[in-house]
Amino acid sequence: MAAIKVLETNVLHASDVLYWLDGTTAETSTEMQRLPHEVQFNLSDKPRDVQIRQAPGKTALWRRPVADIVNGEATETDKTFVDAGSFTLAGTVQDQRGLYNPRTFSVTVGAGSVPIAGQGLVLYPSPQGTRFGKAGGLIATLRFATADTNDGNVVPWALLTAVVTIPAVGTQTYRAQADHRGDVLLPLHRLPPLPQGVDQYALELSVTALLSARADTPLNTDDLVAMNLESTSSAGSFANPIGFSVVPGEIQLIRSANKDHLAVQPS
C-alpha cells in the first residue's frame, strides 16, 4: 500500500465553549441539561477574529491563529494548546422555535488551558415550550401592583422560584421565567408522591424582576432583583416569599387575593 505524504496540517484549538442550559431541569447549573437544539444569537461585542461553530446545546469559539497551517505532518509541539487570551462576548440569544425565552448575556471567555471546562448560560422555557408532567405545577400571570410602570403593568421576563419542603427529606427548588406578557408556567417535575400521613407539601414562592423591564427587550436574568408578591389569601399583604400548599399531580392557578393575576411590588 502506497504511503500517504502529508503536505500540510491545519492546527486549530478551541478558545472556549458555551453550554446552553435548561434552567428548569435541575437546581444547579452543574446538573442542568443542555438544550436539545441549536440556538441563534446576535453578538454586540466580540473580537473580529472570533470564529463560531454551533451544535445542539453548545457553541464553540475559536480565535483565528496567526499561523494555523503547519508544513508537513504536525508534531506534538505543533499541537500544543496556545492560550489566545480572554475576551468579552456579549449579545442576545434566542430560540428560533420559540420554546425558550430570549435573554441577553455578557461573559468573559477564553480558556487558558486544556481540557476546556466551558461556561454554562441558563435559558428558561417559554409557556409555549413548557409541558406539565404527572407531578403537576403552577400557572401565574404577573402584574405590577403600581400603576405607573411600563407595558400596562405587565411584569415581563421575571423569574419565579418555588421552594418545596419534603418532610424527612429536605427542600426542592424549582424555577421558571415569565415571557414578554408576564405569563409563566412552573412545572414541578421532580416532586415526589405524598408519603403516608402527609396530605400536602408546603411551598414558598418568590420573584425577581425589574421595574424597567420592557416586553420588547430581552434581559439578563442575572440582573433581576428581589421583589414582593401579594398574598393569595390576604388582599394588600405583600411579602417575599409568600407561602401556600401544593399537592403532587395538581396544576394550580396562582392569583393574588381578589385579583385575576399575581401582583408584584418592589421591595
Image (cartoon, rainbow, N blue to C red):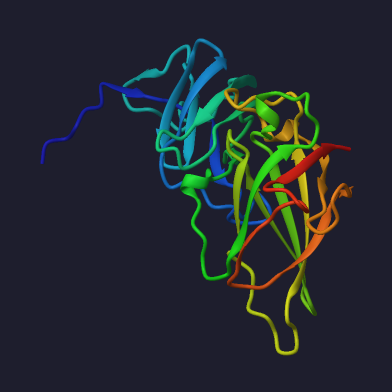
Q: Nearer the viewer, residue 148 or 163?
A: 148
Q: Residue furthest front?
A: 258
Quarter holding residue 169:
bottom right
Q: Is residue 33 left or right of residue 153?
A: left
Q: Is residue 158 left or right of residue 32?
A: right
Q: Is residue 214 left or right of residue 230?
A: left
Say if residue 77 shows up in the picture: no
| Whole-percent x, y for residue 10 in the image | 35, 23
| Whole-percent x, y for residue 99 in the image | 46, 42
Q: Nearer the viewer, residue 94 or 87?
A: 94
Q: Residue furthest bottom?
A: 196
Residue 99 against residue 222 in the figure, above or below: below
Residue 200 against residue 95 in the figure, above or below: below
**What residue lies at 79% left-to-right and 37% top-to-bottom?**
145
| Whole-percent x, y for residue 161 in the image | 72, 51
Quarter of the image where the N terminus is located: top left
Residue 55 against residue 238 in the figure, above or below: above
Q: How many marks overall?
A: 0
Q: Nearer the viewer, residue 203 or 49?
A: 203
**What residue lies at 60% left-to-right and 21% top-to-bottom?**
90
Quarter of the image where the C terminus is located: top right
Say if residue 31 shows up in the picture: yes
Residue 261 against residue 192 in the figure, above or below: above
| Whole-percent x, y for residue 82 in the image | 56, 25
**What residue lies at 68% left-to-right and 81% top-to-bottom?**
194
